[in-house]
Structure formats: C-alpha cells, structure tokens
Amino acid sequence: WLFIKRDFISNYKQTILGPIWFFIQPVFTTIIFTVIFGNLAGIATGGVPKPLFYLSGLVLWNFFADCLNLTSDTFRTNQNIFGKVFFPRIIVPLSIVVSNMLKLVIQFLLFISFFFYYKIFEKTLIYIDISILLIPILILLIGLLGLSFGILITSLTTKYRDLKFLIQFGVQLMMYASPIIYPVNTLTGKLKTLVLLNPVTSII
C-alpha cells in the first residue's frame, strides 16, 4: 500500500489538476480519434457510436500499456530499494498494477456515464447480455498480461537499457494492431489473423 501511495503522490503531487487527468486524457484522445479516424478517415465502428467505441478500447488499452511500460522498468527504477531492504520483489510490479487498476476504475466509470448517455438520451440500440459478467475477469487478465510481459522485459532491461525505448515505441505501435480504432469483424484474411495474434485483441 505504501508503494501504491508513493506512485499516486509522485505522479500528481505538483500538478494543478491532479487526478482530473484521469478523465482528461481518455476524453481528449477519444475526441481526436472520433475526428480523425471516425469522421475524416470514415472507419466504421460496427454501428456503435464512435465516441463510445473508441473510449471503450482506450480505457482498457491505457490500463494494459501503463502496466507494461511501468513494470518493464521496475528493476532499474527501484534498484536502490532492492539493494538496501529485503522484501518479496514481486510486490513492486504488483503495486504498479493495483495503482493502474484504481485509475482504470475511475476511467471505467467515465465510460459507463458515456454508455448511459447514449442509451438514455440518444436512444442508441446497444444491447447488454450475460457476458457483461466477464468484465472483472477480462480486466484481471489484461492486468496480468501487462504484469507478466513487464516482468519478463524488466529482467532484460537491467542489461540491455535500449529495450526500454524499444518497448515504449513498440507499445504505441501495438495499439494500432488492436481493435481500438476498428472492429475485428471489418478485417479479413491475413490482416485479421495478424491482429488476432495480438494477445490483447481477444480481451478487448
């Protein structure tokens, strides 16, 4: 819990807006995606309102990307603590995932508010079935995925520091190979197979 508190304070201590950035980032990104990919590029979203479609993917993707990026640098950023105090090393990357899960919960509430806005005020036909009960399991899976990849990478970055920059760049590119800008059912052939090889695709 001390690590989680440390992460939260260190990120937002000297900011004016503080935790409000939890809302600003996904909202602004959703607006940009709606204008560029939805309106200018004309990419279909399978009948789902464009802002709702992009926001649903971004909330989950941001959670995965933050878990992966931050845990992949665990050994380097905490080497002073590891060298002085003995404690189970897994606690540090786990605290990162939990910190990001708190951020996810806040952003997920934002998504729910968007959902009910379109459902009630826009009268959009969006159906909910029993599969909604899988959401907690899917969130756990995507968190564990980011954690496991991050732990594998952090053991390598202690020796090969260049990997840190490669991972940050690779995660950005990986987003475009995930169904955040487009639905999977709009893809065909080898392109669809390639996107399905991305482990995040099935969860999102």
Image (spheres, rainbow, N blue to C red):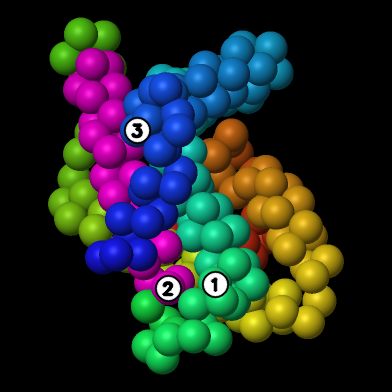
Which residue lies at the image location 56% right of the left edge and 44% below the top edge? 179
Q: Marks 2 and 3: CB-CB under 8 Å?
A: no
| Residue where numbered disc 2 is placed | 92
Q: Residue furthest top?
A: 121
For residue 77, side relative to residue 59 (left or right): right
Q: CA distance from mark 3 to mark 1?
A: 24 Å
Which residue lies at the image location 20% right of the left edge and 8% below the top edge? 121
Q: Position of residue 99 (x, y in %)?
A: 35, 56
Q: Main secondary structure of the magenta part?
A: helix
From which residue to which does the magenta span run? 92-119
The quadrant in which the N terminus is found is bottom left
Which residue lies at the image location 26% right of the left edge and 9% below the top edge? 122
Which residue lies at the image location 75% right of the left edge and 51% below the top edge? 169
| Residue where numbered disc 1 is placed | 78
| Residue where numbered disc 3 is placed | 19
Mark 1: which amino acid?
Asn
Q: Would you identify the image quadrant in which residue 93 lies?
A: bottom left
For residue 90, side relative to residue 69 (left or right): left
Q: Marks 1 and 2: CB-CB under 8 Å?
A: yes
Q: Secondary structure at mark 3?
A: helix
